[in-house]
Image (spheres, rainbow, N blue to C red):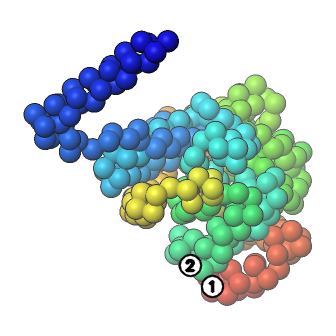
Amino acid sequence: MRLIRVRQIRLRLIRAAIAALLLSACPAFAEAPVVMAPVVIKFSHVAAPQSHKSRAAEHFKALAERYTNGRVRIELYPNSQLYKDKEELEALQLGAVQMLAPSVSKFGPLGIRAFEVFDLPYIFADYEALAKITEGEIGRELLDRLQSKGLIGLAYWNNGFKMLSANAPLRSPDDVLGLKMRIQASKVIEAQMWAMGGLPQVMAFSEAYHALSSGVVDGTENTPANMYTQKMYEVQAHATMTHHGYLGYAVISNHKFWAGLPADVRAALERAIAETTPVANAFALEENEHAMAEMKASGRTTFHEPTPAERALWIETLTPVHDEMAGRVGRDLIDRIYAATGRATQ
Ligand code: LMR
């Protein structure tokens, strides 16, 4: 027994001596930094790999990995390959992924209804009006509300303004009567479809193409970029450029995860996000234009630009949804948006 202990002590001493010898023979070895495994951020989203959301995520990845000197590795998972719409939010809350960029129309089921204010038909006249919110105090306040659900809002990235599509021409709101319309999980979008007599069907983005092609639903609404990258235009013979609503994203993380990052890593990531936002918005504009040109050239869908009189009728039919949904998204919030964007009240 005693002999074994003596041998163990001798072995330890020999090992220590070898280590000391190595260090003295090679000072660089002594100074070599301890190599830490990088923090892995899984960034999941539902848009196609060739979408502007993917391009923005790739831009963010390059900046984030550069600014953190490789201390962070961003893994991108587009096209709902990890999770669909609702599941990805749950996965983020549980810490299975660390970043998402969902449409703000999808926060209602989490219990944060105020984001649905972005879905109110014709609330933003143009990108300038929209930026007053996404780049201002109201936008920041909305992102802060995510904390109550264990999330942190980091930025807004645009997609664009939506059109309505179906397999029959949609010249006026009456043409939507009785049509089953795929929508995102937003009560405001639901009310908007009811306002036209349509039958809203909440469905994950990844299921929209199949539902349209198999006739489970008759029509939908989306931006040109989404219509194009999901090939929805191939199964929708008509679309009307109503530009009735906005679709955009909040870049979000798990609050606990974000707060637990070393301060300098967090600052570097926040810098990468801030620098990506204008690039992401430029990609979105570019992709929406490109998508329109490609879809028109394909000849699969007939695009209708409403006349001024037709446009007036779309606005008249859809804007009562503001008052109808005021109880859900907040009258005060709607009025603050009217004031901030210079929009005339109802
Ligand atoms: C949709 O579900 O239609 C969009 O939110 C998808 C997306 O991420 O652009």
Residue count near mark 1 (Cα–Cα under 10 Å), binned few <14, some 14–19, many ≥20: some
Please identify the quarter of the rendering in which residue 226 is found: top right
CA gap, disc 2 and disc 1: 9 Å
Please identify the quarter of the rendering in which residue 112 is found: bottom right
At a point 22% along the width and 29% down the height, the residue shown is 17
Q: Is mark 2 on a helix, strand or loop?
A: loop
At a point 45% along the width and 63% down the height, the residue shown is 263
Along the line of sight, which residue is nearer the eye, 159 or 25? 25
Rendered position, 124 above or below 173: below
Q: For marks 2 and 1, give the one nearer the viewer.
A: 2
Is residue 91 visible in this depiction of the protein? yes
Q: What residue type is labelled 2?
A: Gly
Tell me where residue 285 appears, x and y as whole percent.
Answer: 46, 57
CB under 8 Å between callouts 2 and 1? Answer: yes
Q: Name the residue under label 1.
A: 340
* 292 horizontally vs 115: left or right: left
Along the line of sight, which residue is nearer the eye, 288 or 101? 101
Q: What residue type is labelled 1?
A: Ala
At a point 78% along the width and 50% down the height, the residue shown is 185
Tell me where residue 212 appears, x and y as whole percent.
Answer: 73, 33
Q: Is mark 1 on a helix, strand or loop?
A: helix
Along the line of sight, which residue is nearer the eye, 121 or 138? 138
Rendered position, 312 above or below 28: below
Q: Residue 324 carries which label?
A: none
Tell me where residue 175 appears, x and y as whole percent.
Answer: 81, 50
Rendered position, 163 above or below 275: above
Q: In which quarter of the image is the C terminus?
A: bottom right
Residue count near mark 2 (Cα–Cα under 10 Å), binned few <14, some 14–19, many ≥20: few
Q: Mark 2 points at which residue?
A: 136
At a point 81% along the width and 44% down the height, the residue shown is 202
Q: Which of marks 2 and 1 is nearer the N terminus?
A: 2
